[in-house]
Image: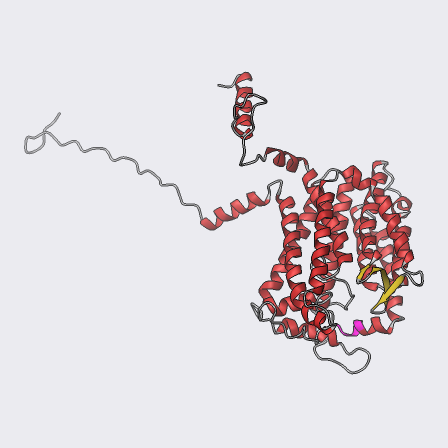
Amino acid sequence: MPGSRTGRPPVQRASRRPAVSRPQRENPVLRLCTRARKAWDRPLTAYYLILGGSLLITVLGLVMVYSASQITALQLSLPGSYFFRKQALAALIGSALLFVASRMPVKLHRALAYPILAGAVFLMALVQVPGIGVSINGNQNWISLGGSFQIQPSEFGKLALVLWGADLIARKQEKKLLTQWKHMLVPLVPVSFLLLGLIMLGGDMGTAIILTAILFGLLWLAGAPTRLFAGVLTIATLIGGVLIKTSPNRMARLACIGATEPKAGVADCWQAVHGIYALASGGLFGSGLGASVEKWGQLPEAHTDFIFAVTGEELGLAGTLSVLALFAALGYAGIRVAGRTEDPFVRYAAGGVTTWITAQAVINIGAVLGLLPIAGVPLPLFSYGGSALLPTMFAIGLLIAFARDDPAARAALAMRQPRFGRKRAGGSGVERGPRRWNTMRRRASAARSSGER
């Protein structure tokens, strides 16, 4: 090796190590979005959304019914918790119906379609019998059960149309008859018009609108041609226009859209305007629970049709947006159940229930906001009224049953094991570990037997 000028051997420098590239840190926002997307795509997401959303709406509705109905009860010389106790009793009965409906198999739901339809038609016809039907606020759609308890059969007509219409269309699809327009219309449309006629005999235009929305939802899910769909829609619009034009009360409600001040004459718009006043005075977080001013005799039907206005006044924009978010989650979950199933009956029934609840919520909230005419329909699961609450909670039980019936959801529910408690071997007194570890051991043994190492 040649020496350097100083006679010393050259110093060998150590070779530099290649720079190790550090892993880039993942954006926490993207990581959070990825986790949320994975959680959103889980098989039981729709199940939890329906169950949790409906229970939250019902509980919040009970709180608001108690707050909004106290002054009305005192004005009628009743205890302040009178309407709340009746609504709580209806919620307990409705919870039992929800549980039963969520545990019933799909075949039993289909078997109940015709009995529920026959019972609803019979009760709706019974309303028109003098001495049996009761008129409230100009609408004769009630039957007295004795004392202060009454029932509105038209609310059960919504559930009847959903179940019967879904079963009818599903059977026709199985026989491949939906390609013919007469099989798509008959007997679905005539029976729907029968229910609508019985409702309109009592003068309840709001419930008739909801029933029409359910009919259109079923036809749309069945794949009705555009011309057929437009024809039925045109006929329904013409009939609705004639009914509105011939009724001064309905014309007055139509004239109150967008009103901001009370007027003189038939269309005084008092209820619509004070609903806007209640929402406007709520601000961002409201005046506080129980501190509403409009419920002190200024706002009619504060605990029924216009409970959303009291919610906006007491809980503010945050409270109203929370209610809207819960209904949006419920609607999304219903659409998801209808879109992911392979059973035609489940698809039509889930779509019909989702159409029913969503359309009724939009009509009620739109009327409170002054964007739609006041139709006199309650906010589902939220407003006071046992006749509306019971069939709606049964319909929620239907959605829960359909969400549980999904194959992926069934597998996920089967994998869930109890966190507490151990199983004992039969008669030996030796405790076994949790079933989860037994399942993992069975998988491991199956993998070894298949040749894996």
Residue 152 appears in the figure: yes
Quadrant, the N terminus: top left
**Residue 351, position in %: x, y?**
75, 48
Looking at the image, which residue is at 16% across and 31% down? 12
**Dividing the picture into quarters, in which one does residue 347 lie?**
top right
Left or right of residue 63, residue 204 in this image: right
The answer to whether residue 279 is above or below residue 419 is below
Task: Give percent across and percent down for residue 235.
Answer: 88, 59
Residue 254 magenta: yes
Examine the structure image and report whether residue 103 is included in the region drawn in magenta.
Answer: no
Magenta span main SS: helix
Q: Say whether residue 285 is left or right of residue 357.
A: left
Residues 236 and 295: in front is 295
Q: Residue at x 73, y 45 (%)?
A: 398
What residue span does the magenta drawing correspond to?
Answer: 253-257
Dividing the picture into quadrants, the one containing residue 273 is bottom right
Can you name the residue that lies furthest to the left here? 6
Residue depicted at x 75% and y 59%: 360
Q: How is the image coloured?
A: secondary structure
